[in-house]
Image (cartoon, rainbow, N blue to C red):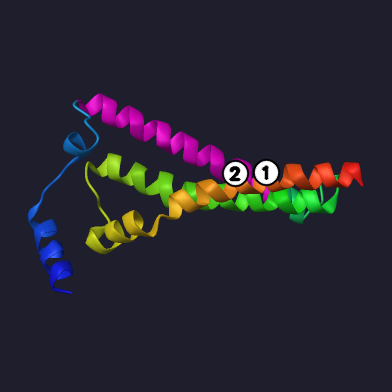
Amino acid sequence: LLYTIKFEADMADITTTNYTIYGIESETTRLCWASYLMISFLCSLAGDTLILVGSIKYRAFRINKIVVVFIQHIAIADLALAISFVLPKFASLLGNGWPFGAFLCNLKVYSGASDVLFHVGGFLIASMTTAKLVMFKY
């Protein structure tokens, strides 16, 4: 507990910007990275929402139901990854620092949500491939 309090006190004294953290030296580079992240977030949001709405509401996919469930779960994992990883990084680049406070900074770093969601997407793709193999084989 004392270490945590001391760590938070040390974090309050440190003033870091994106110039020191990411090695970004110019304003143009920072804004280019921020626009790239916003475009990738918007594409992910539009694509994953379209997949979820099309598969749930309109039943647009005429394939096996198990494969549709896998595709829906991959879309949800990708959407959660975009919200938990891309959006905070965009806000950090746009504001030239972490705008969400020390608690959310520690939560983002130590929760590992982006790492877990990245691996969840990969495992879902692998399990979908295995399920398709089993369906075709038997």
Dominant secondary structure of the residues highlighted in magenta in the image: helix
- Residue at figure coordinates x 22%, y 29% from the top left: 24
- Badge 1 local density, few (<14 within 10 Å), some, or many (20+)? few
- Element under label 2? helix
Q: Residue 32: where, in percent of width, then height?
A: 34, 27
Kindly state the secondary structure of the residue where label 1 is placed.
helix
Q: Residue 126's mark?
A: 1
Dot 2, how many residues are within 10 Å of its Cα: few (below 14), some (14-19), or many (20+)? few
Evaluate whether residue 73 shows in this view: yes
Q: Could you tell me residue 50's position as x and y percent?
A: 67, 45
Query: Considering the image in quadrants, where does the N terminus appear?
Result: bottom left
From the viewer's side, name the closer residue of 29 and 21: 21
Residue 133 vs residue 45: left or right?
A: right
Query: Is 43 displayed left or right of 59 in the figure?
Result: left
Contact (Cβ within 8 Å) of mark 2 with mark 1? yes
Q: Is residue 61 visible?
A: no
Q: Which residue is mark 2?
A: 122
Magenta stretch in the rendered image: 26-52
Q: Which mark is residue 87?
A: none
Instruction: Based on the picture, tell me whether residue 61 belongs to the magenta stretch.
Output: no
* Residue 110 position within the rendered picture, expressed as x and y whole percent measured from the top left: 33, 58
Q: Residue at x 34, y 31 (%)?
A: 33
